[in-house]
C-alpha cells in the first residue's frame, strides 16, 4: 500500500477552490477528500498525481509549505468585465489553469529567471494612444524579422515555427493545446518574468499566427487577453477593455501585413476573394486578414466580408480531422525549448523521472520514448 504523504490541507483547499470546485464535488472524485482537507488523513503519491491532473496544478505545488500567491482568473484578466469572464466555457477555464501551471513550471525549472537574453515586455513600452502602425514597425525591428524574411518562408508551417522561435528569443514562451472550442483561438497570461501565449492547435496555422501577435500586443500592454471569434464579443466590451481588444486586433493585422506593403501588393488587383487568397499566400497569413484590410479600406462591404469568412470557415470544418502521434503532439504543444529545460534539469539530477514526467505532462513510462522523439529533431 502506498504511503500517505504530509501535505498542508490549505494547499488542497487552495487547489480545489482554484479549480472552481466545492468540497462536495471534490469528494465525489476523491473518496477521502473531506479527511484530507481536514488534515486527519493525507493522499498518497499516486493520489497526488490524480489531484494534479484533476485540478491542473503542478504536482510539486502540493509539497509547498503554503499555497502560492497566484491571482484568480478574474484578477488575471482585470481589463475584462465580470460578465464576459463569467461566460467563459468551463473547458477554457481549465486551459487557463493549465497555462498558469506552465508558468509555475517555468519558474521552477529556471530558478525564477527567464532564460532569454532579453524580454520584450520589459524592453518595449508604448503610450495608450500609440500609432499602431508605428508600434508594429518597432516590434518587428525588435524581433529582427524583416518582411522579406516573412515572405520567403515556403509554407505556413515554416512561418508558424519561425515566429514561435522569434517570440521565444524575445522571452515569450508559446504553448499549444487542442482547445475543442471553435470560437477561441488562444489567450495570453502576462507575468513580469514569464509572459506566455497559449494557442488553440485545432485552428488553422494562419489563424495561430494571427493569435501570436494579437496576444503579443496584450503582453506588451501588460495585460492578459483572449483571442475569440465569438459573435459580438468586442461590441459587448466597454471602455478600456474594448479599446485594448481593438488595438490588439489592429496590431496583429498591421504587423503581419504592413500598410505600404499591402498597398503595393494590391496594385493592379481587384478587391476579390481570389486576390485575398493570392496575397494571403504571399504574406503567410489568413485570407481573413487580407479581406479585413479590404473591408477597412471600404473596398468590400461588411456583408461580403462576413459571407467570405463564413464560407472559408465552413470549408475548413469539413476537412478537419483530430489525432496524430502523441509524442510529436507533446513536443509541438510544449515546444522543444521547454522540453529541453526539463530534460536538462533531469540529466543534471535536479529532478527525478517522476518529476520530469510531471513537467512534460506525461507518465513516467513514456518519458524515455518522448526523449527519443525529441532527439530526432523538430516536431
Image (tube, rainbow, N blue to C red):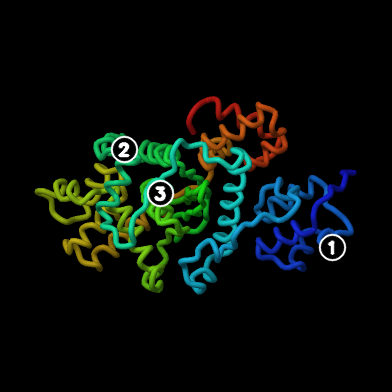
Q: Residue 175: x, y in percent?
A: 51, 45
Q: Residue 200: x, y in percent?
A: 48, 51
Q: Nearer the viewer, residue 171 or 368?
A: 171
Closer mark to the observer between disc 2 and disc 3 = 2
Q: What residue sits right under mark 3 in the picture?
A: 212
Residue that protrudes farthest toward the left in the picture: 268
Relative to 360, residue 251 above or below: below
Earlier in the chain: of badge 2 and badge 3, it is: 2
Q: Spatial distance from mark 3 to mark 1, Cα to Cα?
A: 44 Å
Relative to 119, residue 28 above or below: below
* Label 2 residue SS: loop
Query: How many callouts does the rendering have?
Result: 3
Earlier in the chain: of badge 2 and badge 1, it is: 1
* Label 3 residue SS: helix
Q: Spatial distance from mark 2 to mark 3, Cα to Cα?
A: 14 Å
Q: Is residue 24 left or right of residue 268?
A: right
Specify the quadrant of the image occupied by residue 166. Answer: top left
Residue drawn 42% across and 58% down?
227
Residue drawn 69% across and 32% down?
350
Q: Residue 292: x, y in percent?
A: 26, 58
Q: Mark number for residue 38?
A: 1
The 10 Å Cα crowd at callout 2, few under 14, some 14 to 19, many 20 or more, is: some
Amino acid at each position: 500500500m502506498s504511503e500517505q504523504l504530509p501535505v498542508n490541507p490549505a494547499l488542497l483547499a487552495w487547489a480545489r477552490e482554484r479549480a472552481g470546485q466545492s468540497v462536495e464535488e471534490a469528494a465525489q472524485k476523491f473518496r477521502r477528500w473531506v479527511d484530507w482537507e481536514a488534515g486527519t488523513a493525507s493522499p498518497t503519491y499516486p493520489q497526488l498525481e490524480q489531484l494534479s491532473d484533476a485540478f491542473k496544478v503542478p504536482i510539486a505545488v502540493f509539497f509547498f509549505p503554503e499555497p502560492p500567491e497566484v491571482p484568480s482568473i478574474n484578477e488575471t484578466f482585470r481589463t475584462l468585465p465580470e460578465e464576459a469572464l463569467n461566460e467563459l466555457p468551463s473547458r477554457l477555464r481549465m486551459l487557463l489553469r493549465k497555462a498558469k501551471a506552465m508558468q509555475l513550471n517555468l519558474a521552477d525549472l529556471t530558478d525564477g529567471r527567464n532564460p532569454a537574453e532579453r524580454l520584450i515586455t520589459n524592453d518595449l513600452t508604448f503610450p495608450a494612444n500609440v500609432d499602431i502602425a508605428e508600434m508594429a514597425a518597432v516590434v518587428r525591428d525588435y524581433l529582427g524579422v524583416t518582411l522579406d524574411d516573412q515572405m520567403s518562408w515556403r509554407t505556413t508551417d515554416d512561418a508558424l515555427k519561425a515566429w514561435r522561435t522569434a517570440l521565444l528569443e524575445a522571452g515569450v514562451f508559446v504553448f499549444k493545446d487542442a482547445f475543442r472550442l471553435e470560437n477561441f483561438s488562444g489567450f495570453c497570461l502576462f507575468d513580469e518574468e514569464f509572459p506566455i501565449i497559449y494557442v488553440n492547435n485545432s485552428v488553422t496555422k494562419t489563424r495561430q499566427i494571427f493569435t501570436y501577435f494579437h496576444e503579443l500586443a496584450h503582453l506588451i500592454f501588460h495585460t492578459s487577453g483572449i483571442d475569440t471569434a465569438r459573435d459580438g464579443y468586442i461590441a459587448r466590451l466597454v471602455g478600456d477593455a474594448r479599446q485594448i481588444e481593438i488595438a490588439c486586433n489592429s496590431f496583429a493585422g498591421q504587423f503581419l501585413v504592413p500598410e505600404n506593403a499591402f498597398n503595393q501588393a494590391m496594385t493592379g488587383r481587384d478587391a476579390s476573394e481570389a486576390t485575398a487568397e493570392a496575397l494571403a499566400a504571399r504574406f503567410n497569413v489568413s485570407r481573413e486578414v487580407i479581406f479585413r484590410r479590404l473591408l477597412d479600406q471600404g473596398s468590400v462591404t461588411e456583408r461580403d466580408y462576413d459571407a467570405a469568412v463564413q464560407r472559408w470557415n465552413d470549408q475548413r470544418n469539413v476537412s478537419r480531422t483530430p489525432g496524430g502521434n502523441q509524442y510529436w503532439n507533446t513536443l509541438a504543444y510544449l515546444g522543444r525549448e521547454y522540453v529541453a529545460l526539463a530534460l536538462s534539469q533531469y540529466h543534471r539530477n535536479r529532478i527525478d523521472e517522476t518529476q520530469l514526467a510531471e513537467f512534460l505532462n506525461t507518465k513516467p513510462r513514456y518519458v524515455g520514448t518522448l526523449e527519443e522523439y525529441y532527439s530526432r529533431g523538430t516536431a
